[in-house]
Amino acid sequence: MNSRQEYRNKIIIIIASFIILISTFAFLLNCQNKIMMKTTNEKIESILILVQERYPDITKSELVSILNSPVEKKSILKEFGIDIESESAIYENDFVNKKYFLLEIMCFTLGLLISLYTLYAFNNKTKKEIKDITKLIEEINHKNYKLDIDGNYEDELSILKNEIYKTTIMLKEDAENSRKDKLELKSSLSDISHQLKTPLTSILIMLDNLLDDPDMDVETKEEFIRDIKWEINNINFFIQNILKLSKFDLSTVTFINEKTNLNSLVEEALKKVYPLIDLKNITIEKNEIPDGKLECDKKWQVEAISNIIKNCLEHSESGQKIVITLEENKVYLSLEIKDFGSGISPKDLPHIFEKFYKGENSTKDSIGIGLSLAKTIIESAGGRITVESNQSGTIFTIKYFKN
């Protein structure tokens, strides 16, 4: 039986008690009136018989008239010691009055006791529930979220328990998320520190060499300076990507969506990585689609696509090619980027979109953040990215679903 039903039952008991009490009162009063009326009529009948015997000339109509005529104030009963205001001239009626008065008092007392007991029991239950709720809140305040809260009832206190249960679940999830975020932050800081440590150490070593050898030949100095610049560029690229990812993690990125063409997105992305294409003498094979319209933030999608192309370039040998295939159907726009490098090992494949993950075939300059950023950007536009790889190359497939 649930709590709301129990509450209803107690109310029904109280109402039923009062109905029974009132019905009993009515029944007793009716019985009392009938008995008193019978007794009074019997006494009146005796008087009438006596009057007829004493006064044979008196008619029945005169007797009836006497009985139904207005009563004149007379004090004859007082002469017999009877107060007509507070006493009955018929002793049997006094006995009936006392008897039924006692029964009425007993019935009233019994009904009152039942009602009071019902209210007392309900009040005790309510107090216990309030006490339980108070203890629950105290436990929650002490960050104990492993609580067994029975909330399958419908009364107000049980609804409150249900809300406390929901709040407990939310606080528990927040606590777990907070702990998870702290662990992720710790891991991220460790990864960032590791990523920065190597190029910074290299820069310090080269600077020490330059300071320790003021007579160093110009060619060697220039080589050190070029290497320092290269490392600084890597650090700058790393920091820029970290900041971009952080914007997505904190949901502070504002997208400026507009109708754009997938062909133009790919062209812009290729322009960003052109120096690497030229350096490695990579051939780009690309088709175009007639329409290819999608709604997105062009700047961010160019960032994502260029990161994927850059990854393919880094894993391609000099003189190889990259094939970019665009397709369109009624459901989505598809962009496939295929390289012919050494591929991604099966154990690395499930992790390549994780932050700071570097597979066994990663280049020495890889920071393990480009693909993670690309995936985040693409999914923010409602797209999806998948990857397939084997020893003969890797294929990234991006699908932008139409609204």
Image (spheres, rainbow, N blue to C red):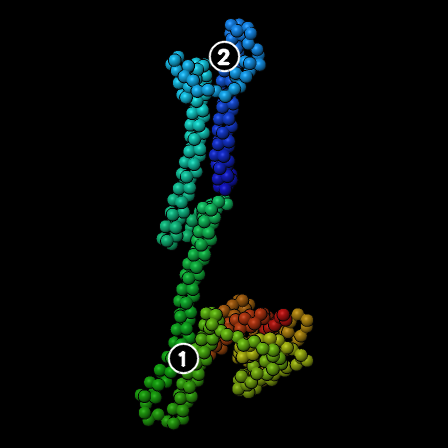
Which numbered mark, 2 or 1, is in the foreground of this view? 2
Q: Is residue 135 above or below residue 241?
A: above
Q: Is residue 330 above or below residue 96?
A: below
Mark drawn on residue 240: none
Q: Whole-percent x and y of residue 179?
A: 41, 61
Residue found 47% across the figure and 34% down from its top: 14
Residue found 56% across the figure and 76% down from its top: 257
Residue to which mark 2 is pinned: 43
Q: Nearer the viewer, residue 390 or 164?
A: 164
Local secondary structure at mark 1: helix
Q: Is residue 383 above or below residue 69?
A: below
Q: Whole-percent x and y of residue 184?
A: 43, 66
Q: Is the residue marked by circle 2 packed among few (<14), some (14-19), or many (20+) residues within 10 Å?
A: few
Examine the rendering and report whether any part of residue 58 can be seen: yes
Q: Nearer the viewer, residue 78 or 170?
A: 78
Task: Please indicate whether residue 368 sits to the left or right of residue 287 in the image.
Answer: left
Q: Amino acid at mark 2?
A: Lys
